[in-house]
Amino acid sequence: MIRFAVAVSLLVMAGGCREQQVPAEATVQPVDLSETARQEAVIEAATQNFEKTVKEPFLVRRHMTVRGLTRAATRPHANKPAPLSAAQYDPGASASAKLELVDGKVLYTAAAGGHDPSAAVISDGTARWRVAYEISAQLTPDGELTAFVFHHLGEARRDAP
């Protein structure tokens, strides 16, 4: 009987040791590269690029109004079109943007290739994915972008380490 009790206790202890030796599975969350996540990343990237290339230099530093900026970008100039002119816009370029007045609304259209610094980025801290895009957004009189429309949403491509 004592041998039986010792054998059972050894089996129980051995089973308990095996459970402790097996490492708990680490749950690795995959990076969300869904369409919704890519759209959110594109909206963030386009907004940051707009603020850096349009809002800060023209609306904040030069104290231009949205209407004045749009007029400057949409009126033909004798020398060359303004940098944000529709005549300068090239969706095939690595990055391009334009301002247009369409049906009384100011539209900001931007395109960025997957290898351009203005591409959208999704990162998990160790790896980065870039997303190419072409979008339009309405520019409010306060200089904010709203009502985003996606003309092209690229697939996420992983950056080389």
Image (cartoon, rainbow, N blue to C red):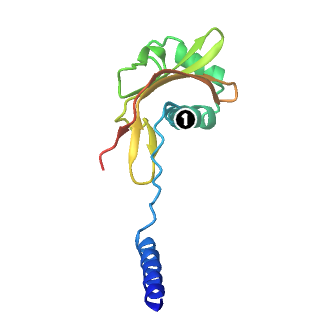
Q: Give the side of residue 60 with respect to residue 25, left or right.
A: right
Q: Residue at x 47, y 56 (%)?
A: 27
Asked whether 26 or 18 is in front, the reply is: 18
Q: Residue at x 41, y 73 (%)?
A: 18
Secondary-structure class at tag 1: helix
Q: Position of residue 142 (x, y in %)?
A: 70, 29
Q: Give the side of residue 93 with respect to residue 153, left or right.
A: left
Residue type for callout 1:
Glu
Task: Identify whether 14 is placed above or below 119.
Answer: below
Q: Quadrant of residue 6?
A: bottom left
Q: Quadrant of residue 71?
A: top right
Q: Quadrant of residue 154?
A: top left
Q: Position of residue 127 (x, y in %)?
A: 38, 49
Task: Identify whether 130 is placed above or below 8.
Answer: above
Q: Give the side of residue 16 with respect to residue 94, left or right.
A: right
Q: Position of residue 16 (x, y in %)?
A: 47, 76
> Please, which residue is most extreme toward the right here?
142
Q: Give the side of residue 148 with respect to residue 10, left or right.
A: right
Asked whether 139 or 15 is in front, the reply is: 15
Task: Identify whether 46 is placed above or below 11.
Answer: above
Q: How crowded is the residue under tag 1: few (<14 C-alpha within 10 Å), some, or many (20+)?
A: some
Q: Residue at x 46, y 45 (%)?
A: 31
Asked whether 16 or 7 is in front, the reply is: 7
- The residue that disc 1 covers is 40
> Please, which residue is most extreme toward the left here?
160
Asked whether 77 or 95 is in front, the reply is: 95
Decide if residue 142 is in sight here.
yes
Task: Identify whether 28 is placed above or below 64.
Answer: below
Q: Position of residue 34 (x, y in %)?
A: 48, 34
Decide if residue 80 is in sight here.
no
> Please, which residue is most extreme toward the bottom here?
2
